[in-house]
Amino acid sequence: MNVDEEVATGVLMTEILFYHLTESKLEDALPPLLEKSLERGWKVAVQTAAVERRDALDVHLWTFRDDSFTPHATDASDKAADQPILLTATSDNANAANVRFIVDGAEPPALDAYERIVFMFDGYDAAQLEGARTQWKKLKGEGHTLTYWQQSPEGRWQKKA
């Protein structure tokens, strides 16, 4: 189903993007994408594969840049539902996010609850690379429209497919 068909039928498919990290770490690439999501008025969930990684990203988002404030919390917070960015290690959507970032090879939740799903994977981590390939094949086979982005040597995102 193309976009015109989706609009005509009232059935909008989730936009699915794959971001292949080749020139930077997730800690460097994720914050600007989160900031852009907030600028667009989106609520965001970032799903990690482990609680320890969720907590490390939580600390990182408070300290990654002196002149920046990225409003967020973890799903362990009492105010998780109110957060514009929620870090989680589960498939729950506690903040009613419309965009979900899947990192570190986490297993994605049902996609239809989101406008956009973004898989971010480290191209130098064999398990993450294989997991992204598996997700790509599965989702393509289900008829989803997928977009693949890879970093240029300068670290900019280039659309490859």
Image (cartoon, rainbow, N blue to C red):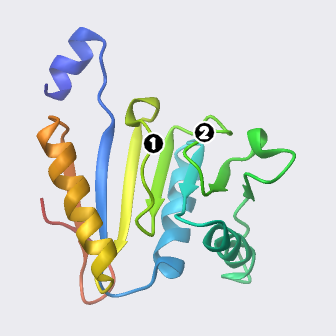
Q: Which comes before the other along the chain, label 2 or label 1?
A: 2
* 3 w.r.t. 34: above or below: above
Q: Is residue 78 left or right of residue 101?
A: right
Q: Are marks 2 and 1 in contact (CB under 8 Å)?
A: yes
Screen quadrant of the C terminus = bottom left
Which of pointers 2 and 1 indicates the residue nearer the eye?
1
Q: Is residue 76 left or right of residue 151?
A: right
- What is the three-letter code of the residue carrying label 2? Asn
Gap in angstroms between the C-alphas marked 2 and 1: 9 Å
Outermost residue on the right side: it is: 78
What residue lies at 19% left-to-right and 47% top-to-bottom?
A: 138
Screen quadrant of the N terminus = top left
* 93 w.r.t. 6: above or below: below
Q: Position of residue 78 (x, y in %)?
A: 87, 46
Depth check, front residue: 146 or 53: 53
What residue lies at 33% left-to-right and 88% top-to-bottom?
A: 23
Q: Position of residue 28 (x, y in %)?
A: 51, 81
What residue lies at 58% left-to-right and 39% top-to-bottom?
A: 97
Query: Residue tagged by mark 1?
Result: 109
Query: Residue tagged by mark 2?
Result: 93
Residue 14's quadrant in the figure?
top left
* 12 w.r.t. 41: above or below: above
What residue lies at 47% left-to-right and 55% top-to-bottom?
A: 101
Q: Position of residue 2 (x, y in %)?
A: 14, 28
Depth check, front residue: 81 or 28: 81
Depth check, front residue: 113 or 130: 130
* Residue 141: assigned label: none
Crowding at dot 1, Cα within 10 Å, few <14 / some 14-19 / many 20+, comes out as some
- What is the three-letter code of the residue carrying label 1? Pro
